[in-house]
Amino acid sequence: MRGWMMAAVAVLAPVVAPAQEARVAIQTETSSLDPHFALVGANQAMMRHLFDPLVASDRNLRPVPGLAEFSNPEPDLWEFRLRPDARFHDGTPVTAEDVRASIERMPRVPNSPAPYIRLAGSIAALEVVDARTIRIRSRGVDPSVPLNAMTAWIIPARIAATATTAEFNAGRAVVGSGPWRFVEWQPGSALRLARNDGYWGAAPAFARATLRPVANDAARLAALLAGDADLVDAVPPGEVARLRARPEVAVSTASSNRMIYIGLDQANDPSPFVTARDGRPLAGNPLKDARVRHALSLGINRAAIVDRVLSGAARASGQLAIEGQLGFDPDLAAPAYDPAEARRLLAAAGYGEGFRITLHSPNNRYVEDDKTAQAVAQFWARIGLDARVEVMPSNVFFTRAGRREFSSFLIGFGHSTGDAWLGMAQVLHSFDAARGLGGLNRGRYASPAFDGLMEQARGSADPAARDGLIRQAQRVAMGQDMAVLPLHVPDNIWAHRAGFSYAAMVEESTLAHHLHPRR
């Protein structure tokens, strides 16, 4: 479809939008405008337009001053000093009381499919020192505090006290201090924004921005080529060469901070979508057996998926961390494709005849997500499984995944920092809401050995020691237990009108304020 779609619009003349409005077509729509509703990538991208996090990040996802400067005057004390020129969209100054109210609200939002528990779990005490200064007393030495502050979205205290998610979604409570002001949201249609001329940071290049969700890849590219969009994201890798050949289009790419992996239910007996090959219930859950999980991993040809499904625009991986992060282990390579060994492990675990399993996946969240899921199922069929695939829109998928309704599911984790501890503590640590751990551990993997190493790393302020402990933890979770099945790290690919430039970054969020007219 994509080939003929591009040919069909080839005769159209180049169109450059006026600089008054940025028109952006995005693959995945946010599920809410409540900044504390869900710690998932699509929502985070929208929050970066409207709200400021307490701590900013640089191009390498390291914490840097933004809304606040921060310091660590005592081993378990973090001080945040707000910049004096930061103001909310209603003109009121951002104060330490707003920060306190926002942090306290974050873990308490009802019905969150991915709760903001991680910063709250680090805090022993909050102290408002003065109008611009707030202190966090952590539960011992904890370098994760500023890392978690990078997704601590700040809203006015008066709104934090009473506003519901429904009031944010209606627009009544959307008051942030970010580079854009809210104008209108029509779910499924468009989010409209206006430039915040009082923003403390670099002002957007456009007076207005419209972000439209267009889940279909061909339709998204057609909008760009027809002049109806200035910027599109999640460009299918197979289309890059065609786009680069067109003079009216430019392509911007960056390596990604996102790991695509398969989560596995390790809690339920039986698991909801695992049965005998003939559909009869199984006595237990085979996914609880590490031999089965290793078999499923060895049965996936990651190199073929990268080459054939993703046109080479990804890197196969064997761990949750990404290269360049603290905790990345170069010795944890992507598992080699070995269907014979996979069959042997299944037989050793008592499943020599295989079993039936359904792999669930979104179809509009990650690049070629549905095609990747189909490829995985085909590989699993070759090792004796009756593997089926069910795909659905991302808003449905994440709600169901958050309720832990799946047996196996294709999902991603986008690292928000250059330290792998944060992601591993959410995806792989035993679930512990009170301590802010395991909030995204949807398969409920649990290992005392892994948790112990992560606890040691959490309390280590020495980068070399921390790096070594995180690597050891990964060897337990991935090398020994195969807690999840890492697949690949995709490239970020955007396409835009040739009259514009886009600041592509390792962070995959598509941001209207990163789009600029060329000078």
Image: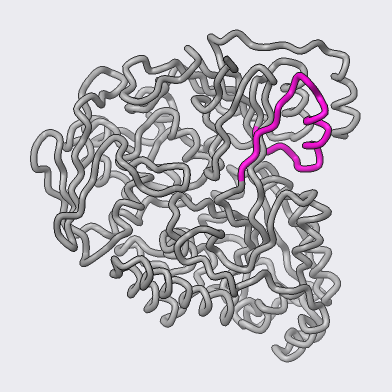
Q: Does 244 sit above or below residue 478?
A: above
Asked which quadrant contains residue 412, the reply is: bottom right
Q: Does 177 sit above or below residue 492?
A: above
Quarter in which the N terminus is drawn: top right
In the image, 379: left or right of 414?
A: right
| Residue 174: % across, % down | 37, 26
Depth check: give the residue in front, 153 or 183: 153
Residue at point 44%, 71% (across, down) = 470
In the image, 434: left or right of 353?
A: left
Q: Does 410 sit above or below residue 157?
A: below
Residue at point 54%, 54% (across, down) = 413
Asked which quadrant contains residue 201, the reply is: top left
Task: Say if residue 301 shows up in the picture.
Answer: yes
Task: Say if residue 173 shows up in the picture.
Answer: no
Depth check: give the residue in front, 243 or 163: 243
| Residue 261: % across, % down | 63, 61
Query: What colouring does the structure picture have?
Result: one colour
The stretch in magenta equals 233-254
Magenta span has 238?
yes
Q: Does 16 sit above or below residue 297?
A: above
Residue at point 51%, 19% (across, down) = 192
